[in-house]
Image (spheres, rainbow, N blue to C red):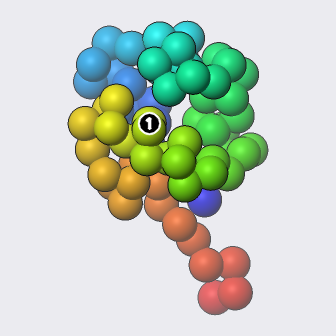
Amino acid sequence: MKTRIKEFRARYNLTQADLAEQVGVRRETIVFLEKSKYNPSLKLAHDIAVVLKTTIDELFIFEDDNK
């Protein structure tokens, strides 16, 4: 899964720490998400999308490994 979190954060001048604080996770979680090393729960994906004023579909690109 790829993510556009960094791109959307830049639109709102949010640091990783700012976003982490607003969604209630550690900054390292945002780092791992941005590097595609961690798949978020649906709740976390939703919370991030709300803060970044977008949808989960716009924020995360799901890739089918079976193709």
What residue sits right under mark 1 in the picture? Answer: 48
Seen in the picture, residue 34 relative to 59 is either above or below; the reply is above
Task: Determine whether, in the image, residue 41 is placed left or right of residue 37.
Answer: left
User: In the figure, residue 33 lies in which quadrant?
Assistant: top right
Q: Which residue is depicted at the point 59% across and 36% down?
A: 34
Residue 13: x, y in percent?
32, 12
Q: Which residue is depicted at the point 48% across and 60% down?
A: 61
Q: Which residue is depicted at the point 61% across and 78% down?
A: 64
Seen in the picture, residue 16 relative to 67 is either above or below; the reply is above
Q: Nearer the viewer, residue 50 or 15?
A: 50
Task: Determine whether, in the image, residue 6 is placed left or right of residue 42.
Answer: left
User: In the figure, residue 47 lies in which quadrant?
Assistant: top left
Seen in the picture, residue 32 relative to 60 is either above or below; the reply is above
**Image quarter hosting the N terminus:** bottom right
* Circle 1 crowding by C-alpha within 10 Å: few under 14, some 14–19, many from 20: many
Q: Is residue 3 visible?
A: no
Task: Determine whether, in the image, residue 45 is placed left or right of residue 52.
Answer: right
**Image quarter hosting the C terminus:** bottom right
Task: Determine whether, in the image, residue 25 is placed left or right of residue 10.
Answer: right
Q: Which residue is depicted at the point 34% across and 21% down?
A: 10
Q: Secondary structure at mark 1?
A: helix
Taking the view exactly as shown, the residue that stands out farthest to the bottom is 67
Residue 18: x, y in percent?
47, 11
Residue 27: x, y in percent?
65, 17
Q: Nearer the viewer, residue 56 or 11?
A: 56
Amino acid type, mark 1 = Ile
Q: Is residue 43 visible?
A: yes
Residue 31: x, y in percent?
65, 27
Seen in the picture, residue 9 relative to 67 is either above or below; the reply is above
